[in-house]
Amino acid sequence: MTIRPHRLTLEEIASPESTIPSIVREAANAYGDKPFIVDGAGRILTFAENWRRANRFANALLAAGIGKGTVVGLFSPNSFDFVTAGYGILASGAVFTPFNSSYKQRELIHQICNSGASVVFAARSLMPRLLECRDRIQGCRLVELEPGFWESAPATSPNVEIDRDRDLAFLPYSSGTTGFSKGIELTQSNLVAAVRQLLFSQHGMHDPESQSYVFLPLYHIYGFNVVMNVVLAGGNTLHLRAWFDMDDCLDTIEREGIGNLPLVPPVLLNMLSRDDLGRRDLSSLRWINIGAAPVPVPAVHRFVEITGVTVRQGYGMTETSGIATVNPPEAPWDVAETAGIPVMGMDAAIFDLESGNRELPAGETGELALRGPGIMRGYHSAPEENAIALRNGWFYTGDIGHIDGNGRVHLVDRKREMIKYKGFQVLPAELESVILELAEVRDVAVIGVRDSHGAESPKAFVALHPNRQLTAERIQAHVKSQVAGYKQVRAVEFIDTIPRSPAGKILRRLL
């Protein structure tokens, strides 16, 4: 199989009628033996071999009686085998539900039972954790994820009819920052819509010569659809890692000339702790895309000042197949201070917080709602949640913000995380941004705590850079100088690390 000499158009490889399996096939035809994924040991998975392995996995599933409509779980860190299994499950017509690789027994049982998974493939290193659940998941087969399952199966495309608009294809679970996670039902058309939106919005991602460095977990929509599937369709090369290693990341950027580095906020904050950051050669980076959780603007400005690399925010959710708004490459505004404009085919509006029925004019703050081809079918087996989130043709995100006169979306916080102090609304993200203006602060989380009378007030949990010192009084004085009186931080606690999900969201319930 050879590489075509010309650059493909988006319609050739990611047309509106595509599915993820068809993109895998077309990428193999187009790019052949070009490296698709390179791991930390230098091993290479080509576009052609990726397709063959996915077909073998799909055919092995079908031969085992696992196919259309069957929910298949995958419990594995980032690896070639994860990629093979994920694409193979989708090619078989089964429903792919990936598990967070850090899950423990309680979380595994919940997702297996809630999703209705009848089989779960687990990496050898994670199988003991899954076997602990056997008594609570009777009827669900547990299979080790190893090549012996698929390597002797045919490498031809499986004969399966997939309804891209109706069939449930991908069932990821939300991070569960406020309790048990929810399954999010996505179709092939949802996933492909987001891939197309990103390819049209991020011109550099469609340059086949571009390379990306990715440590984001593939079980998350950010790693799987926003990054890997876009790299696949764009003909790029993905340097994939199972976890983040700062030295490996910086060394690989310099050695390989990495052009794209998708990040989450905690990693950017950790990079700012590097004394040598300003001396590293990051000139190959076109930009850094950051998403999955709110990012403090002062930290972004500090990073740009040190490195000279543009950091652009984007916004999306698992419920939107990973993307909703972006800052385009040619944006003339500060791309750190806004989530950008809606992607192709996505409508955005702001509704009042009280009723949710009144659309607000530009500049007024309320709940962000979206509609477009990437919006989920709904939450899995959760009619009450769906009734709240999906109304009048809109998906209500639960995020608070406004849309300015130029159509740019500005987000300030999550609706459910808003603190009520003596009747006033206080947004944690605003206070976190203010506190991060202090150079000693590495990370911060603000939550509402209640006193013996049930009254709520803001409390800050602060993590400092190594070998730096700061007092609670100085933090409170800085906040007092920047925001209104009712927004003051009433208590400060210093901790080593702010608890965050793998996607970077603050786990406020743990604080």
Image (cartoon, rainbow, N blue to C red):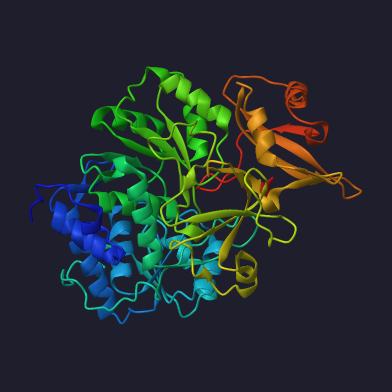
- Name which residue lies at 17% across and 57% down: 28
The furthest residue to the right: 453
Looking at the rendering, in which quadrant would you find the N terminus? bottom left
Q: Could you say where residue 112 lies in the image, as x and y percent from the top left?
A: 50, 70
Say left or right for 334 vs 26: right
Say left or right for 474 vs 105: right
Along the viewing direction, whichever of 235 and 102 lies nearer the viewer: 235
- Name which residue lies at 68% across and 62% down: 357
Say left or right for 345 vs 484: left
Q: Could you say where residue 20 lies in the image, as x and y percent from the top left?
A: 30, 63
Location of residue 211 by image quarter: top left
Q: Could you say where residue 215 lies in the image, as x and y percent from the top left?
A: 38, 43
Looking at the rendering, in which quadrant would you find the C terminus? top right
- Name which residue lies at 55% across and 62% down: 107
Along the viewing direction, whichever of 265 and 313 lies nearer the viewer: 313
Q: Using the image, determine if residue 123 lies above or below residue 334.
A: below
- Name which residue lies at 30% across and 35% down: 259
**Do we see residue 508 in this rendering?**
yes
- Count of marks overlaid on the render: 0
Say left or right for 60 vs 260: left
**Do we see residue 273 in this rendering?**
no
Q: Could you say where residue 70 lies in the image, as x and y percent from the top left?
A: 39, 78
